[in-house]
Amino acid sequence: MIVMINEETLQDVINLETGLLAPLTGFMGAEDFRSVVECCRLADGQVFPLPITLDVPEEQFADIRPGDTLTLEHNGVPVAELDVESKFCMTDGDIETVFRTGEDAHPGVRKERGRSACRVGGPVRLTDRSLLADALKPEATKRAFAEKGWKTVVGFQTRNPIHKAHEHIQRIGLEVCDGLFINPIVGWKKTGDFTEEAVMAAYRRMIEEFYPRNRVHIAGLKTQMRYAGPREAVFHAIIRRNLGCTHFIIGRDHAGVGGYYGAYDAHALARELEPDLGIQLLLTREPYFCKKCGQIVTDKHCAHYETDRVEISGTIIRKYISDGYIPDEVMLRKEIFDAILGCGQVFIP
């Protein structure tokens, strides 16, 4: 049977093939799915916080049986095969458990509800090997780190161009580790987010002009944003572990959106799961510019959070630029602003 898949599902297939989503080797079956939704762990106990599932049209679902082999096609081209082990449905209750909300205003919820509720799980094999040519591969990043002589590597996840708050966190990472791996999301993001081109242009300028080049490595991560907050923060840590990082930064409202998660909910879940993650976490507080201190600080070493704080975030930077204003240099370096504007289309339509 042929099942058509979209771009995001194809990318999941590629990332399963490369080992980016290890220990997964296929789309989750019913047992793993239920355990992940309820416990943030696979059925065998390994930490995995987000469902990675294959949805199929309802009209095909009834005819699929365990033991079948499905041919997965993208844009009419066969790209992979899946050996069916189980079938199940994702309910609205499951969606609410994963995202901590059932509101369609949440972009991850809305995108998940746009998929078929019918899911099929089992091992998957990529048959079109040409799709691996530009894929981010763990063996490649591990080799790059080794060639640079890095024993410790801190991974940094982002969907925004670099601003002064993120720069502060990254410099902390560089104090702790031999190297910094900047790994921006370059897959699906919501309307209004920065484009891949804007993010990468900003970081290339930062590396060219400000960071020591022998201590920074950058590569895009092709996967979709789920905006799942705490669960996605741990998911991001697992991916960077698989890519060879020894450390991973989780900041304020990591992978959050629209106030759906508490500022440090991701820290709480990460602390709970860290003993079994296989990567050391750097749980950082919110950096801001303090008018009294005259520098970027956090509430761990500044007494003026309530009185002299100038907030810095990707959301604020996006609003400045979309409204036609130049962000103050306490938030964003002019060189980075120029790089963003020079890339062409700045925001996802």
Image (cartoon, grey):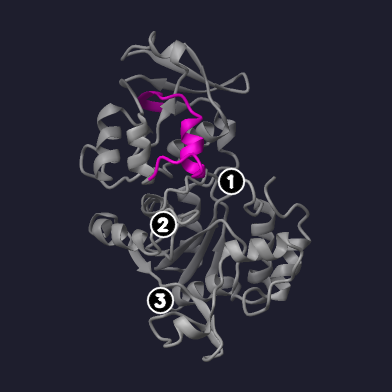
Nearer to us of marks 2 and 1 is 1
Question: Which quadrant would the C terminus be assigned to in this image?
Answer: top right
Magenta stretch in the rendered image: 101-124
From what the image shows, is residue 293 above or below residue 191? Answer: below
Q: Mark 3 is on which residue type?
A: Val
How much space separates mark 3 and mark 1, taking CA atoms? 33 Å
Q: Is residue 265 magenta?
A: no
Which residue is at the front of the view, 245 or 53? 53
Please name which of the two marks, 3 or 1, marks the residue nearer to the observer.
1
Separation of marks 2 and 3 at Cα, in angstroms: 16 Å
State the residue position of label 1: 190
Q: Which mark is residue 245?
A: none
Residue at the spot of label 3: 176
Query: What kind of element bears circle 3?
Result: helix
* Residue 270 pos. (x, y %): 31, 59
Q: Going 25% across and 40% down the picture, which residue do you hit?
A: 38
Disc 2: which residue: 244
Q: What amino acid type is highlighted by mark number 2?
A: Gly
SS at badge 1: loop
Q: Residue furthest top?
A: 63
Residue at image coords 65%, 58% = 200
Q: Specify the quadrant of the image occupied by residue 26.
A: top left
Q: Is residue 268 visible?
A: yes
> Residue 252 lies in what quarter of the image?
bottom left
Residue 266 vertical position relative to residue 213 in the rendered view, above or below: above
Q: Amino acid at mark 1?
A: Lys
